[in-house]
Amino acid sequence: MRKSQGPVVALLLAAVLTLAGCSQWLESPAKPANDAIAVANGHLEKAASLEEQVQTKVADLESLPATKDGASQGLEITKGLRDTIASEKTELASAKDAMDGVAKLEVADDYKKYAELESKTIDTRITMTDTTLRLFDAMDVLYNSLQKGGTKVEPQQIQAVIAQVKQELTDLSTQASDEAQAAADYFTSKGLGK
């Protein structure tokens, strides 16, 4: 005589449904943090690509002749770069929001500390975008002066301002690099992301 497998199937089905409802128990407790960090990294990759575009065009600006034609080209380039920088800043802000969101999650403090370190780096990069816009403002004054024959603004004064803003950008870049390295070192030393 053959026994019915109905009760066994029913028990297995109940167990599967129970586990399906509790599947989150099987996930890594760090998954929410890793997900937020992945979102931030996606935005940071986009921001890095935009920053690369800006740096390429800034190199083009550096090679322009100090003539009316060069000034016209420079004004066109800086105008186009402002949109690129606005997009970069939006991506950085989105990355910062994702990193700052880790602090609100129920995850280990190591993840929160890492996200805090990354957020600090992103803040510095946002400051860099604002400083780059200040650089373009100063360059536009120089370009406008060159277009008008240099009668209203002394080019040496503007070039001194440009040099000062470039130094600020160099310092901010070094700071952001150091902060990013500190965050990466922390991530690695704590074995996060596993």
Image: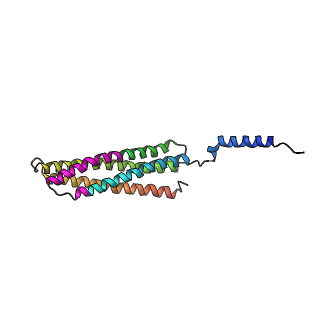
Q: Residue furthest front?
A: 1
On whether residue 79 falls in the magenta region, the answer is: yes
Q: Is residue 133 visible?
A: no
> x%, y% of residue 42?
45, 50
Which residues lie in the magenta part?
60-88
At 41% from the left and 44% from the top, the residue drawn is 94
Give the mark count: 0
Question: Which quadrant of the rendered structure holds the N terminus?
Answer: top right
Q: Quadrant of the C terminus?
A: bottom right
Q: Main secondary structure of the magenta part?
A: helix
In this image, 61 relative to 43: left or right?
left
x then y, percent, for residue 127: 33, 48
Picture residue at 52% right of the left edge, 51% below the top: 110
**Horizontally, is 127 left or right of 143 in the view?**
right
Residue at 26%, 55% (x, y): give it: 166
In the rendered image of this protein, does residue 170 appear above or below residue 108? below
Percent of width and height locating residue 82: 28, 46
Quadrant of the rendered structure where residue 12 is?
Answer: top right
